[in-house]
Amino acid sequence: MTDLDPVVTGRPVRLVPTAPGFWMLTLGVCIAALAPLLGFLLGVMRQRPQEEVLFSPLYIGLFVGVLVGGAGMVLAVLGGIRLWRHLRRARSLEDEATEAVA
């Protein structure tokens, strides 16, 4: 195909937006899954101090990772609630439209 050939139009593309809450749910699940792992990794990478400490860096890293993962779970739950409400509202509007036609 060269630049002189006429452009053949294909099938039209229809972009459909995602439902509200989908990306919040996805981001929350990813954060909740990866945060404890990354906290553990950062805790392992820090060297143990020579002097006596109350908590080791491994414990602190894992604890912070669990806290961030908990925030990710809250984000996922809020996104799931928002997505569920949107889908429920869309279904009820669809049912009302079906009843109005009948």
Image (cartoon, rainbow, N blue to C red):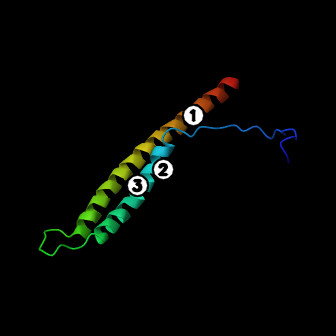
Q: Are marks 1 and 3 in contact (CB under 8 Å)?
A: no
In the figure, residue 13 lies in which quadrant?
Answer: top right
Q: Taking 17 as reference, is 7 left or right?
A: right
Residue that extends furthest to the bottom in the rendered view of this protein? 50
Picture coordinates of residue 102, whole percent (x, y): 70, 26
Alpha carbon distance from label 3 to label 2 = 9 Å
In the picture, the disc for residue 26 is 2
Which amino acid type corresponds to the residue marked 1 in the rendered image? Ala
For image coordinates 81% across by 41% down, the residue present is 10
Find disc 3 in the rendering and name its residue.
31
Frontmost residue, 39 versus 96: 39
Q: Taking 66 as reference, is 91 left or right?
A: right
Alpha carbon distance from label 2 to label 1 = 21 Å
Dot 3 falls on a residue whose secondary structure is: helix
Q: Taking 66 as reference, is 83 left or right?
A: right
Which amino acid type corresponds to the residue marked 2 in the rendered image? Thr
Picture coordinates of residue 48, whole percent (x, y): 21, 74
